[in-house]
Image (spheres, rainbow, N blue to C red):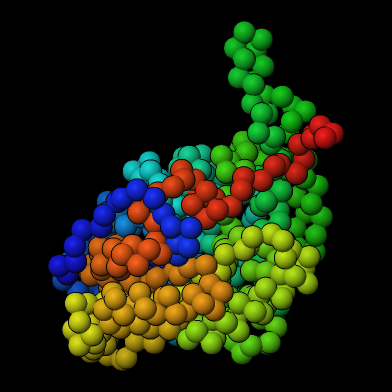
Amino acid sequence: MSSFPPASVFTSASAESLHLAVALDGAGWHPAAWREPGARPGELFTARYWADAVAEAEAGLLDFVTFEDSLALQSSSADGLDGRTDQVRGRLDAVLTAARVAPLTRHIGLVPTVIATHTEPFHISKAIATLDHVSRGRAGLRIHVSQPAYEARHFGRRAVPLPDAESYEEAADHIEVIRRLWDSWDDDAEIRDVATGRFIDRDKLHYIDFEGRHFSVRGPSITPRPPQGQPVVTAAGAAGAPGDGSAAYGLIARSADVGYIAVRDADGARAAVTEIRQARESAGLAEQPLHLFADLTVFLDEDAPAADARRSRLDALAGAPYSKDTAIFTGTTAQLADLLQDWRTAGLSGFRLRPGALAHDLPAITRGLVPELQRRGVFRRAYEADTLRGLLGLVRPVGRYAAHPAA
């Protein structure tokens, strides 16, 4: 483990603070990360491993963590299993992992990945509502679209995957159903009056009666309205040429509170932000807040040559240079802070950092990068809210079905 100073907690956050999240995936995003010293490969499928990772992120005052998930074993092949046995294969369920970690944390947001393509929005709605109750208002979800045919074969519901655009249209409907189900209980629907024997007010539970191309859902939910009203919905946008009409960008623009974009540089970030903002305006949502985070894979060390050497060592173990859909940063925490501040001028709210090797690079973020950003006055010195919406500056929405008295 690197010798970065411990993360500090001070008093208040700057009005110009960056937002920071960390994407957790196994031992790290480099396929050979599980072979690094301190990686704890024997504990990857234990609750303690994930609790420790989230506790480290919370000590660094990060806004939230995301938990990766998928419907198939990890693979480097587009056609299914690649047959490799020298890389991590297998995951715990992201929503269940977040729920297990929730009682062990107090402030940090918990955002598991859910796959819209082969799951029902009713099930996802109550799972994330439950996570929000368990965490007392710190839940979100990262909606993911599954397109490989080999994942579809696990379910047998479709002979072939949907076309790209239709997959994202289905995901948008999926989110809409989830949001309506969260609102299907009024905030005060639960009476819990032992003397009168009334537990709920039936008039404050609502049918959502959603009829769309992909789903027909009546409702109401079986789970009371989440503490946040609406847990935070996040989605990822695929990298592409500006103006390519990315279906993923469209999903962010229409349906998300937070979008992640995979770009290579500040110019790419600027183009993506412009495209998504224009799509949001076209959807009539320009006045609704939307955070855009750039995804960035990081390998950090005390000096740039040491970071390069560590990445090269991991590449040698993996048998190939590491490449990903994101930009890859290799260097010091001060250099990374420079890059984040530069990219931020493209219109980004923050960054979702992917630690190359979790055991090394997560502490480098929390104990090196965070103090550096604090010294520059661009990152919080204490948690300023108790909910994820609060940390992101998002108001708690009023339920759409609740009766509102005339003003």
In the figure, is residue 74 to the left or right of 238?
A: left
Number of numbered discs visible in the structure rendering = 0
Residue closest to the eye, 120 or 206: 206
When the figure is inspected, residue 194 is found, relative to residue 13, above or below; the finding is above
Quadrant in the picture for the C terminus = top right
In the figure, is residue 26 to the left or right of 246?
A: left
* Residue 229 sits in quarter: top right
* Residue 299 sits in quarter: bottom left
- x, y percentage for residue 175? 66, 58
Name the residue rendered at 45%, 65% in the picture. 18
Name the residue rendered at 64%, 26% in the picture. 190
Residue found farthest to the right: 406
Quadrant in the picture for the N terminus = bottom left
Residue closest to the eye, 11 or 46: 11
Residue found farthest to the top: 195
Residue closest to the eye, 388 or 371: 371
- x, y percentage for residue 89? 35, 71
- Visible residue check, residue 245: yes
- x, y percentage for residue 354? 38, 72
When the figure is inspected, residue 154 is found, relative to residue 220, above or below; the finding is below
* Residue 310 sits in quarter: bottom left
- Visible residue check, residue 160: no
Name the residue rendered at 64%, 88% in the picture. 242
